[in-house]
Amino acid sequence: MAGRENVFDVAWYLGIFAVIVGIYVLLLICARFRPAEAAERVIAFRKMEGIIKIAVAVPGALACGLIVFMNGAENTQWFVISCLMAAVIISFAVSFSYYMDSAEFFKLRLTTVISVLLVAGCLAVFHYDLPGYDSYLPKESQLSGMAVKFDGILKYYGGVGEHYRDAEQLQLDHMETAVTPEMYEEIRQIVSKQTERKMTDQYDSEIFRISVMYHLENGRKIYRTYYEKEERLRAFAKKMLNQEEYVEKLCDLDAFLKCTMQDGTVQDLRTNEIQLLFDEKELHELFSLYAEEMRTANFSQLIHEHMVGELSVAYSSAPEKDVFTTEYFTIYDSFDSVIEYLKKAGFELNQSYRPEEILSITVETYEEGEENVNREIITDSEQIHRLFPYLNKYAVGTIWYDSDAFVENMMLSVVWKDGNTSNYELRAGGEDLL
C-alpha cells in the first residue's frame, strides 16, 4: 500500500513537470515562428491576450476566494465577493502585463466581463448544485450494498494507518453492509438537505460529517461526503449500532492484529500513560483478547459503560514496516480478560477513586490560538468534593465520542496523595463550580 502511494506521488509530480515543459516548448516554437510579435511583449500573439486572461482569471479568482474563506470568512457572501473582485483585478493585471501601459490597467474589456461572468457561473453551479453531485442518490433497487461512517461520533478500527492516502475509502469498503429500507430513508433525508448546507454550515460546530459509499449492482462504487446536524446523526448512529452486521464490521480487528506492533502503553483512572514492557508477541496476545471482548460486547450498552483505562500501541501495516501509527483503545468495565491479562503482567487497574484521595486539582483554561493559559490550583477539600463528580478521564479510544458532555478548552490535572498525577476533562456543568 505504501509503495502504491509513493508511485502515485512520483507520477503526479512527473505529470506536472511534463505539462510545464510542454508549455515552455510550445512558447519557444511560437516565438520562433512569429519573432516580430514576441518583441518587447510578454505575450507573443495579440489574440492570445483574451484567452490567457480568461484562463488565468477564472481559476485564479476561485482560488483567491477559497483562500479568503479558509482564513476566517464566516459565510459564503465573503467568498462570492472575493471571487468576483479577484476576477476583475486579475483581468486588469493581465491587460497591463500585455501592453505594459498603466492606462490599460483600468480599461474594461469584453474578456474581463466574460471572466467575471464565468466566475459567477461557477459559483452558481456550486451553490445550486446544478450537476447534482451533492444531491446524487441511487435508487434503492440499484444498490447491492452501502456503507456509512459517522465522523466524530463513532470510532472505527481496521488496521488502516493514517499514512494511507485512500484510508477513508478502505474503511468505507470494510464497513459495507446490506441496504435496509430504514437505512436508505435516513440517507435520503440527509441528501435532500445538502443544497442548503454548503460551506458555511460545514464549519458550524453543530454540523457533523457523514461519509457514504454506494455499491451499485453493476459493481461500481461511489463515495460521497454529506453534512448534517449532530443530533440527527447521533440518532442515526444509534440505530446502526442495533444492526448486527454493522457492529461486526465496526469492531473487526482482524486486519489490525496482522500488523507489526510496538511501544504499548496503559493508563487508568488514577495514572497517566505508563509504558508496557511487552514484546510484540505479548502485545498481540493482549489485543487478541481485546478483539474478542469487542466481538462479544453489546454496543448499545457499551457506549454508556464505565471506562476503567486506556491502551495505546504503535502499529504498522505497511509492507516496509517502517511507518507507524499510534492507536488508542478504551478498556471498559466489562473487559475482564484484558483487565486480568494486565494484572498478571504486574499492572492492576485502579477502577475507582475517591475525592478523599486527592491532594490538589490544577484547572487550566486556554483559548484556541492563544499562548496564555490561566491556571488555578484548588486545595480546598469542600471544593474538591463538589468538583469531583464532574471529573472525566480523557479518552481518545472511546467507541462513542460525546462532544457535548465536556467543557471545551479546559483541562484538569489531579495530584493524588500517593504522588500519582492524572489529567481529566471537566463534565458540562462543572464550570459553574469554579
Image (spheres, grey):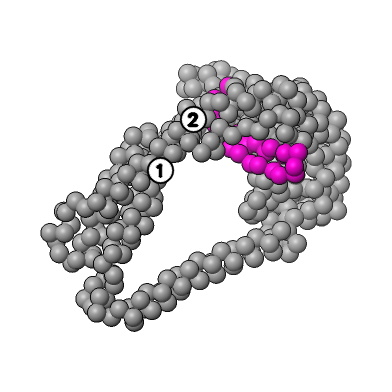
Task: Inspect the image, locate mark 2, and give the three-letter code of the amino acid beneath it.
Answer: Thr
Q: Is residue 315 above or below residue 28?
A: above
- Magenta residues span 209-231
Residue 236 in picture, x, y percent from top left:
66, 23
Q: Is residue 307 magenta?
A: no
Q: Which is nearer the eye, 28 or 75?
A: 28
Q: Is residue 250 above or below residue 60?
A: above
Q: Which residue is mark 1?
A: 122
Q: Is residue 34 above or below residue 43?
A: below
Q: Residue at x 32, y 78 (%)?
A: 31
Badge 2 density bin: few <14, some 14–19, many ≥20, Cα 10 Å: some
In this rendering, does residue 304 appear at all? no
Q: Residue at x 60, y 39 (%)?
A: 224
Q: Is residue 215 magenta?
A: yes
Q: Main secondary structure of the magenta part?
A: strand
Disc 1 element: helix
Residue 259 falls left or right of residue 425: right
Q: Which is nearer the eye, 379 or 250?
A: 250
Residue 232 in picture, x, y percent from top left:
59, 22
User: Quick one: quadrant of the N terminus?
Assistant: bottom right
Residue 195's disc is 2
Residue 430 in picture, x, y percent from top left:
53, 21
Nearer the viewer's eye, disc 2 or disc 1?
1
Residue 419 falls left or right of residue 79: right
Q: Residue at x 65, y 51 (%)?
A: 166
Residue 59 in picture, x, y percent from top left:
39, 52
Disc 2 element: helix
Task: Inspect the image, locate mark 1, and give the three-letter code of the amino acid beneath it.
Answer: Cys
Q: Which is nearer the eye, 266 or 164?
A: 164
